[in-house]
Image (spheres, coloured by chain):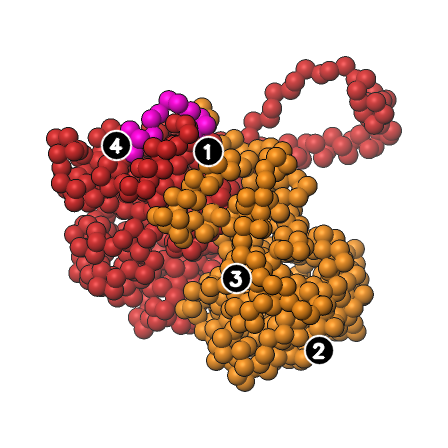
Amino acid sequence: MNLFCEIPTPSRRALLATTGGLFAWAYLPKFARAADSRDPRLVVIVLRGALDGLSAVAPVGDPDYVGLHGPLALSLTGNTPAIPLDSFFALNPAMPVFARLYGAGQGAVVHAVATPYRERSHFDGQDVLESGFPGPGHVASGWLNRAISALPRGARVATRGGLGVGPTTPLVMRGSAPVLGWSPQTLPQPTEDLASRVLDLYRHRDPVLGEALLQGLAADKIAAGDMDNTPRGGFASAAGMRQAAQGAARLIAVDDGPRVAALAFDGWDTHANEGGATGRLAQLLGGLDGAFEEFERVLGSRWNDTAILVATEFGRTARINGTTGTDHGTGTVAFLAGGAIKGGRVIADWPGLKPDQLYENRDLAPTTDLRAVVKGVLADHLGLGGTVLANSVFPDSLDIKPMAGLIV
Amino acid sequence: MLPGALMATDIHAGFIALNRFGLGSRRDGDLAAAAADPRGFLRAELAKPGVALLEGENLPHTPVLLRSLYDQNERNRVARLSNEMAEAARAEVGPMPIALSMTEAGEAGAPAAMPPEKPKEPPKPPLQQQVFRTETIARLQRVISARPGFVERLVAFWTNHFCVSAVKGPFVRISAGAFERDAIRPYVLGRFRDMLQAVESHPAMLFYLDNQFSIGPNSTVGQRIGRGLNENLAREILELHTLGVNGGYSQADVTALARIITGWTFAGRVSQLGEPGTFVFNANAHEPGSQTVLGRPYDQEDVGKGRAALADIAKHPATAQHIAYKFARHFVADEPPPVLVERLAQTFRESDGDLKALALALLDAPEAWSAPATKIRNPQEFLYAAGRIVGRMPDDPGQFLGALNILGMPLWSAAGPNGYPDSVAAWANPEGMKVRLEICVRIADRWRDALNPLDLLDEIAGAAASPETRQAIARAESKQQGLALLLMSPEVQRR
């Protein structure tokens, strides 16, 4: 009995070819084009579960690193050597694309970085990371959405709104600025007649559902492109990350499309059997690397004006735990990639890894506030002013100055 | 009594009873029965003996399932070993046998020229997948028969509160359903503290949050192999299961509780500690010595130490507050009326965590009935409600599971231990609404002209339906389109 759908189903390409523009971008509000010639795009990728920064970008030059990270520690020698970034740091070998971008001056790492959150709950940590507030408990809107709202009306980035990838919009992108949702897994589309009838009913009875449905129908047409829409197994798998990045890149590549996208990749909570140069974490890092590659490939010439920021809620313990993994920690890394990034460097005020240098004698001590990094990108890439950044985008953060020189 | 003869207000209350608290209206007189006595209709279900239990010959208890998984893993291990030995033997013999080489050449060269082979029997899916399907079928059958389904909603709430996720691997995949049957269902109308004890000592939870690996550093095992604590389960007990993140505990409390529950594990395939697949206390892994949690010392040197700590945490006022808030948020509104939350917390405290009293207090609260229907059904609730309206759930559980996947709520597979989100914003998003529409199209396609959507609207909503929804369905170009509109209507999507 086919009560519900058979899944997965044929792609919706055939339908796309025959349907008109009812739900295309023309359906959404149009605004005047901004006058300036730059057309910046910004992608924020949240790594949910807390990335082990010491295994992603290893301080191989620190004499205490190997002792702390034990069998997980990366090494410049052996079968799967880490990729040296400079004389002190080396990249996990699962990330050859990022290594290439780094070499081309289009990738940068910020190390020993953390949000202002100093406890160790994932959910509160993610709320702080994504809401932009100094503490937990604020889940109504995210800093990326408020950054879009704060842009002058008419600015190209503002008028196109944001893109939230996934079955649910990541908190960082939730808020009053318009957000399109899109997720790679799909079924064939309903007829436009039925869709417009449902929308009409919602217009009278339930505008909230109506707005959501309208945007969902519109976004899907663009993202599909000629992509194989077979579900890939979610955002905690390498293939799923790549597929999500490909669809998101298509959506922000469109001239009328959003300029700012938020994605969330899961699975970074490596309490047990984390692995080092190979293994579980390396597979996930490979997925992130694949996402960089998809953005670069699909965006084409627009890559030059693109900045990607990758951040996680906190780091993990410097010492490994009893289960060859790491527990919730503090300082970690953030990645920057894209043609707009002034890359080829690891930005770090390195705190050291001796017991008294570790935060609470357990975690990499944070020496850079992640908000300074984000503010630097928002200021130089999107043109947001310091006052707005310190008040509405990152409330109560006047003393956190934007990091200069991150954008070309 | 005919629906038309009832007061409109009763119909509205009956509609709320079925949708806000239950699994949704069915076509067989549910609405009339609910409208006649909305609260009584719900209370009657709570009074049925054993109403929350789910039993069946094909639904064994947790240890039986885990033993079958152990056996499967052992068979696979032996098979791998003998394969490796065979390969090693071939390598010693020398070059590959000629026939095999030719086959490979043929495949690489001209596959079309090969004679068509007999279709092979598809390999049987792994045991954990078979069990997952069986468990799913049992839920689909229950969902159709439940009346009005308030108890199943409570089961879903508590299962999500004490989330385990099959994302973790085969161990949780094979035991997630049994976890719900053995650790949640027996207690949804019982005591919170009993559910807490059952959950935290269930192998699925111990495995999901890594407690079997957590070793007391000063225990016999810890001293011998030099391994240590894993705080994962202890942290989530305090943060998610009981006190809540603002419940006033510290990192020191987390670590102390982690030490207290060292040794809480389950017996493996071959174990001297107990029957394979059951909860056991491994004294050799238990951190010795007194521990203090939330100011209270715990001195026992056995499983009683953890039992006592959990019993105290279950009674803590912050636990009552945390549970009351989540309960009200789930059933009433994303931001529930504070007076309702306080009344529920008071009930929880004064009844010593009696969960049936908690459910009855919710039904007795006027705020729970007067609040507008702002919540959206989560994907699971939506698929259940749709199935009840058309009178049937899919025979193939794969269709139901696939629909849940693309709606972002894969069964027993939440992304983290905080479970699935419980807010309007999390589910009423563009992608989710688009997929709901697509699924409604598929359901309507399946039923085509067999159901009259206007009759269905009368049966499930009656006078509680808005004129706009009635008109939209009446004007539909076909029964099929009308059914899709009905399933997408706010009357079905909201609760």
Q: Quadrant of the N terminus of chain B?
A: top left
Amino acid type shown at disc 3: Met
Check disc 2 and report the residue beneath it.
A405
Q: Colour of chain A?
A: orange
Chain of residue at mark 2: A
As rendered, which of B211 and B415 lies closer to the eye? B415
Do dots 1 and 2 share one subunit?
no
Q: CA distance from mark 4 to mark 2?
A: 66 Å
CB within 8 Å, label 4 to label 2: no
Check disc 3 and report the residue beneath it.
A173
Is residue B450 rendered magenta in the image?
yes
Task: Residue at 73% x, 15% y: name it.
Answer: B116
Residue B277 visible (yes or no): no
Check disc 1 and report the residue beneath it.
B441
> Where is residue A289 drawn, in percent x and y?
70, 56
> Where is residue A181 drawn, in percent x and y?
53, 52
Chain of residue at mark 3: A
As rendered, which of A28 and A217 lies closer to the eye? A28
Q: Colour of chain B?
A: red
Q: CA distance from mark 2 to mark 3?
A: 25 Å
- Residue B417 figure quarter: bottom left
Amino acid type shown at disc 1: Val
First in sequence: mark 4 vs mark 1: 1
